[in-house]
Every structure is written in C-alpha cells, then in structure tokens.
C-alpha cells in the first residue's frame, strides 16, 4: 500500500525518470508509484502490448496535467537503436533526473544442460541491458553535474545457490558496476543505488519457476515472497533517503550475514541443498 502521507508530499513533482524494464513487475510498480508521487516517466521495454497497458495505467494515476508518460519499444542491449530514441525523448522534454534500471531475467537450469549461449544471453540482458541505457544517459548527467542512477541486482548478486549458474555472475557484475560508478561519480554529484530484491511475485518469477530445477525451487521456498508493490515502496523510500544498497525484506539480514559469517551461510545453503536432493530422490 502506498503511503498516503508520501503521496500528499509529492516528492517527485517536476521530476523525470527513465525506466528501462518498466513495463512489468518491479519496474512497472515503480513507474506507477513515481507517477503517484508527482513525477513523469519514460518506460523502455520490448513488448508493445505491455508498454501500452502500463502507459494507460500510469495515465490514470496522474494528478497534474503537466505529468507525462512516454514509452519506447526497444531492446536495451542495442546501443545503436536505443540512443537516438532516448535522445529524442530528452529533446522533447528534458534531461531525466533519474535512471531506474530494471531490465533483467533469470534462467535457472542444471549446469549440464546449459550452453555457452545461455551464459552470454544472461550476461547480455542482465548486465549490458542495464549498462547501455546508463552509457546513453550518463553524458547528460556529467554535463549537468547531477542525476541519479539505479541498478537492479538480486540477493543472488551477493550469495548463490545451485541452478543459477548463468544468473549469479551477471548479478554480481551489476553490483561491481554500481560500486565503481558510485565512487567515480562522486565529484559530479551523481548518485548511484543498487537494488537487491528477494523472490518477488512477478511474471518473470513465474516463468523462472516453470523451468528451474526442483532442488532450486525447494531451496527458494525457504525464503519469503514479496509483491512487486512492496519492493517498489522500499525502492522509492530508499531513493528518497539516498541509500546506496536497497535491501527489501530478508535481503538486509542476508547480506549482513553473508558478510559477517560467510562460511556459516554457505553451510546453511549446503544443508538446504542436501535436504532438497533427498526430497527429489537424489543423492549428494
């Protein structure tokens, strides 16, 4: 549920956010919340059906005529196609105040069934799909010496379980990118944050569950499932607070434990894996 007091404050009045991956799931929930809090948005995704639906839903949440909801249909890994589209939006409106990167997907599968192309595809979408929009918008932020960039990792960006062999490296990579940009962009007054969502009830998560290894599914069930709206609320509040690491739900405890007691956490994960193997009739 959106904080009514926050809606009354309209903290993003007059602000503009570009949201790659904003047509579904956490990105969509964030786009809708940003509109409710007074801002304007440009959503980037590939599918026009989802873009049109999200645009219509966001229009209904506007509180002022001056708010706008733009959409761009494009693959965010394609620099040549995406750059002129974003440039046109900026020329039409203004330089964004925020770039919220939500592009990503998970392909959970047994290692022996993976190909090199599976690894390349996960890195292409999860890493370059967030890097490319950043490289396009960054020169505007550098020139103006202001702006805010966010990336989306995962709890699998600081810990790992079986089945996520193609996914984890891409999410660790995004964490590294956010860390170095946070440091290097300090003199330019450009803020950086990174989101580490736990399992979240989204269309992508449903598709992930459809194909993931049974052991992986059993291990994942030991955690909690958040709604996209819950994650968006935590995300937006953390942006307003200027937090670098955004840790919804159990992620805050998990990252702390992983840093302070990594061997203990790995031991817990190993025991969960052994238990899952027994449930599936496999030995370890």
Image (spheres, rainbow, N blue to C red):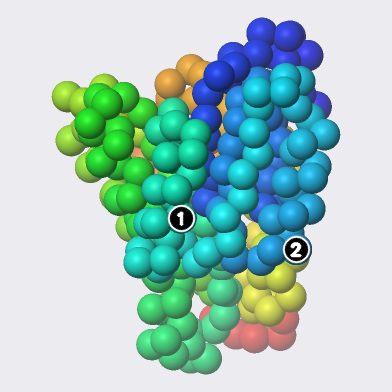
Image coordinates of residue 83 in percent, x first then y, are 38, 57
Cα separation between marks 2 and 1 = 19 Å
Image coordinates of residue 185 in percent, x first then y, are 22, 32
Residue 148, placed above or below residue 6: below
Residue 252, placed above or below residue 54: above
Which residue is nearer to you in this view: 263 or 43?
43
Which residue is nearer to you in this view: 5 or 32?
32
Q: Does residue 96 appear anywhere in the picture? A: yes
Q: Which residue occupies 65% across, 23% down?
A: 66
Q: Which residue occupies 57% across, 74% down?
A: 108
- Quarter location, residue 249: top right
Which residue is nearer to you in this view: 113 or 139?
139
Q: Does residue 218 appear anywhere in the picture? A: no
> What element does badge 2 sit on?
helix
> What element does badge 1 sit on?
helix
Q: Which residue is mark 1?
A: 85
Quarter of the rendering occupied by the N terminus: top right
Quarter of the rendering occupied by the C terminus: bottom right
Residue 57, placed above or below residue 84: above
Q: Which residue occupies 78% across, 14% down?
A: 4
Which of the two marks, 2 or 1, is nearer to us in this view? 1
């Amino acid at each position: 549920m959106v904080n009514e007091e926050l809606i009354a404050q309209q903290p993003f009045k007059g602000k503009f956010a570009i949201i790659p991956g904003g047509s579904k799931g956490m990105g969509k929930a964030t786009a809708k919340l940003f509109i409710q809090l007074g801002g304007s948005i440009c959503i980037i995704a590939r599918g026009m059906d989802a873009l049109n639906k999200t645009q219509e839903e966001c229009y209904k949440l506007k509180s002022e005529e001056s708010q706008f909801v733009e959409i761009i249909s494009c693959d965010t890994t394609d620099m040549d196609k995406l750059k002129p589209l974003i440039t046109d939006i900026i020329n039409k409106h203004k330089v964004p105040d925020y770039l919220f990167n939500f592009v990503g997907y998970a392909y959970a599968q047994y290692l022996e069934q993976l190909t090199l192309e599976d690894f390349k595809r996960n890195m292409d979408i999860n890493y370059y799909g967030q890097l490319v929009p950043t490289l396009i918008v960054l020169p505007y932020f550098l020139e103006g010496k202001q702006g805010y960039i966010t990336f989306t990792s995962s709890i699998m960006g600081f810990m790992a379980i079986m089945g996520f062999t193609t996914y984890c490296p891409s999410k660790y990579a995004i964490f590294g990118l956010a860390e170095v940009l946070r440091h290097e962009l300090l003199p330019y007054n450009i803020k950086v944050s990174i989101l580490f969502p736990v399992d979240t009830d989204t269309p992508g998560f449903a598709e992930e569950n459809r194909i993931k290894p049974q052991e992986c599914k059993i291990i994942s069930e030991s955690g909690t499932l958040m709604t996209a709206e819950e994650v968006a609320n935590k995300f937006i509040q953390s942006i307003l607070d200027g937090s670098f690491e955004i840790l919804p739900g159990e992620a805050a405890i998990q990252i702390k434990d992983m840093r302070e007691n990594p061997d203990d956490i790995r031991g817990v994960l190993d025991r969960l894996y052994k238990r899952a193997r027994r449930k599936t009739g496999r030995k370890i």
